Amino acid sequence: MTYFMIGLGILLVVFVALMAYSSHRGSGGIVLPEVQTGGSSVEGPGGESSLNVVEISPETVLAAIRTLSRPAFYSRSQMVETFWSGGSGQSAAQVYASGGQIRIDTQLEDGSVRHTLVSGERVGVWYDSEKSWTLLHSAGQPAASDAMGRMLTYETVLELPAEEIAAADYRERDGVYCIYVEVLPDSEGYISRYWVSVSDGLLYAAERILGEKLVYRFTAGQLNTETPEEELFLLPDGSTLEG
């Protein structure tokens, strides 16, 4: 009986190991490392963690980024810095998102504030407390709001063939867990680098390099997931961008 129980135990261990290996091989999905930001992890619709351990590489990073999604409601600060020979400049902005609408309040060098409201392909722009505003058109979300906020749009990475990705991995930056992507030089010699937060799917940081010189840097502040006030998404005359 003792030998029988020992043999049965060995068979059960082998069976469980084979089942685990088969499940891992059969899933074929790309998932990310578990995120512990502020003591919490990212969970899927069923309450189960949607981020698990996997190696991020140029071959797997596109599939990994596709598992991320941006929050529908949030606000945060953003900083864009540009560098050139003999000087530099910076632009600070506060960003608000509500459903399909994005508002960006940008502090300009002359002290004025440019307000930009983006909804689909419509963009409204006004300055300070002016009541008049200008209607522009864009190519749509989310690239339109990224462009208005002078962000590198990381969704363009998803359209790249894997051979154009020079490096990719999973790393921490300023306490934020990110997917890092570095793209080969473009036709003008610029190298783009992206840090995409795995906890919210938003671009956390980005850089552009020409040769060995940093020419552009984007950084984001702490994310606030509270729903912004509805008044923020009204045009200065009280109307909505949809008309």
Image (cartoon, rainbow, N blue to C red):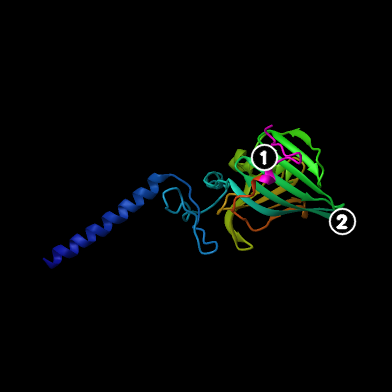
* Residue 142 image point, x, y percent: 64, 40
Where 141 sits versus 32, above or below?
above
Where 155 sits versus 37, above or below?
above
Q: Dot 2, how many residues are within 10 Å of its Cα: few (below 14), some (14-19), or many (20+)? A: few
SS for callout 2: strand
Where 21 sits versus 137, above or below?
below
Which amino acid type is shown beneath numbered disc 1?
Answer: Ala
Magenta stretch mostly in which secondary structure?
loop
Closer to the N terminus: mark 1 or mark 2?
Answer: 2
Residue at the limit of the structure toward the front, as seen here:
238
* Residue 137 image point, x, y percent: 73, 32
Which residue shows up at 83% across the image and 54% down it? 89
Q: Which residue is mark 1?
A: 143
Q: Which residues are magenta?
A: 231-243
To which quarter of the image does residue 170 belong? Answer: bottom right
Q: Which residue is mark 2?
A: 87
